[in-house]
Structure formats: C-alpha cells, structure tokens
Image (spheres, rainbow, N blue to C red):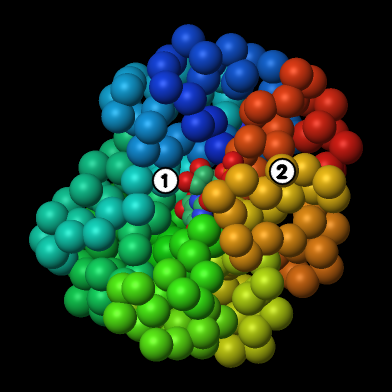
Amino acid sequence: MTTNSPVVVALDFPDMQQAIAMADQLDPSLCRLKVGKELYTATGPVILEELHKRNYEVFLDLKFHDIPNTCAKAVGVAADLGVWMVNVHASGGQRMMEAARNELEKKSHQPLLIGVTVLTSMEQRDLAGIGLDVEPMKQVERLAKLTQSSGLDGVVCSAREVALIRDVCGADFLTVTPGIRPEGSDIGDQKRVMTPKQAVEAGVHYMVIGRPIVANEAPLTVLESIL
Ligand SMILES: O=C(O)c1cc(=O)[nH]c(=O)n1[C@@H]1O[C@H](COP(=O)(O)O)[C@@H](O)[C@H]1O
C-alpha cells in the first residue's frame, strides 16, 4: 500500500513478536515502518516479508558504510527484498555512494537510496571527538551536496537542517528526519530535535519517529495526534 503520510515509525524491538504486535496496532494507510539494526539482527529478512504481507512499505535502515563493492552489493540485496527505502552513510564517500546507485540501476525494483549525514544524536563536541572541527549544520550541508552529486535521492538529517538543504539541493531532494519529539516528550539520546509541527513547517519529506510512538501505551492514538 502506498500512503502519503510523512511519518515513518521506527520498529526498534528485540524480536519479531513485539515488532509484529506493534505493526498490528498501527495502520499502513497512516504510516510506513522502519526496520533498523536491532530488529533486523534479531530476525533477518523474514520481518520484511511479514510487514509487506501486512501492506506496509518498509525503510530498511542498516546504514551501510563499507568499501564500495561491499556496500553496493548489500544495497542490491535490499532492493531484491522489495523495501521502499534503504540508506548508507554519506561519510563512506562519493565512490561508495555511486557504486550503490549503479548497483540499483541493474534492479527491477529500485528503493529510494538515502545518505545519512550527521546522526541526530551528535552535536558539535561529538564531531570534535572524531576529528571534525566543524558545526553539525556545516557538515550536514557538505555531506548533502556530496550525496546529491553521487546520484542519491536524499539525506537523513535533523529537521533543523532541512531549510538549508532545500536552499542548497532543491525542494525535490528528499529529507528524512529522525530526532522528532512531540511537545513534552522525552528527548532520550537525541540532540538535534524538533517537534513534528516544526519539522513540517521546515519542509521535511519524511519524519522518522520511534519511542514517542512505540513506547506509548496507545501508539495509534499518538500517531493520529501527530498526523
Ligand atoms: O537513519 C536513521 O533512521 C537515523 C539516523 C539518525 O541520524 N538518527 C536516528 O535516530 N535514526 C534512527 O531513527 C530512530 C529514532 O528513534 P527515536 O529516537 O526513538 O524516535 C532510531 O531508529 C534511529 O536508529
């Protein structure tokens, strides 16, 4: 099922049973689902089959970051699994991203290919810790340009950087933003956050939201109130 909802719910669970229980409480006409490292490591590709059977479009968030050949082949396998979106770390560089793009060109089903810029859990001092003496905004801009020139469809960034990316890369270049926190909800390990309303006003294409929805006793109600 294709939905025009901007919300992608992060199914961050340690096993199939909990993930499916959550999917069954949500609605594929109101959101897409994201399968990340925790769940995929626990279940392997069978979780994708189960979610596709339930009519969900799935963002496979494994953030590939490797030598060009390895990264490209992994992205190719993700395409064969029928996912809607897949991502790589933009800091893997242009040759890695171009190899991934080229691999997808060979596929009959081509997921959206997205580059992760600077994780929303990072702030300036975290970048300094890995030797990058630069503000997050500047690093996101640099990696967004590199991602676009490598032929990818868009970037993962925080909603705070979306206005800038629209200026620099154009409004059609997709922005996928985690670090979304409804007013009053716990920020947890995220650093560069915005509310859903601020994110929409900034022009975000897709908002990734995990704990504020999946850790709530009434996930569908929270999703509906966000929408
Ligand atoms: O690629 C991602 O989805 C991602 C990138 C990023 O920079 N920050 C980030 O939080 N994420 C993912 O987005 C989700 C956010 O979940 P919550 O913080 O629970 O809303 C998690 O599954 C993260 O793995």
Give the answer, above or below, for where 50 lies relative to 145. Answer: above
Residue appearing at x 48%, y 25% in the figure: 13
Mark 2 residue type: Asp
User: Height in image: 72 above or below 152?
Assistant: above
Task: Left or right? Give the position of 23 relative to 27.
Answer: left
Q: Look at the numbered disc 1 and say if its residue's Cβ is closer than 8 Å to ligand 1.
A: yes
Spatial CA distance of label 2 from label 1 is 23 Å
Q: Quadrant of residue 106?
A: bottom left
- Mark positioned earlier in the residue sequence (2 or 1): 1
* Residue 137: x %, y % from top left: 56, 82
Crowd around label 2: few <14 · some 14–19 · many ≥20 (10 Å): few
Residue at the spot of label 2: 186
* Residue 47 position in % (x across, y down): 40, 22
Q: Which quarter of the rendering shows the N terminus?
A: top right
| Amino acid of disc 1 | Asp
Q: Is residue 32 visible?
A: no
Asked whether, in this view, residue 93 is left or right of residue 204, the answer is left
**Would residue 77 be seen by someone viewing this image from the given angle?**
yes
Q: Quadrant of residue 9?
A: top right
Secondary structure at numbered mark 1: strand
Q: Dot 2: what SS?
A: loop
Q: Is residue 223 left or right of residue 151?
A: right
Q: Quadrant of residue 168?
A: bottom right
> Which residue is label 1 attached to?
61
Residue at position x 15%, y 66% in the image: 68
Image location of residue 189, percent across then percent down = 55, 50
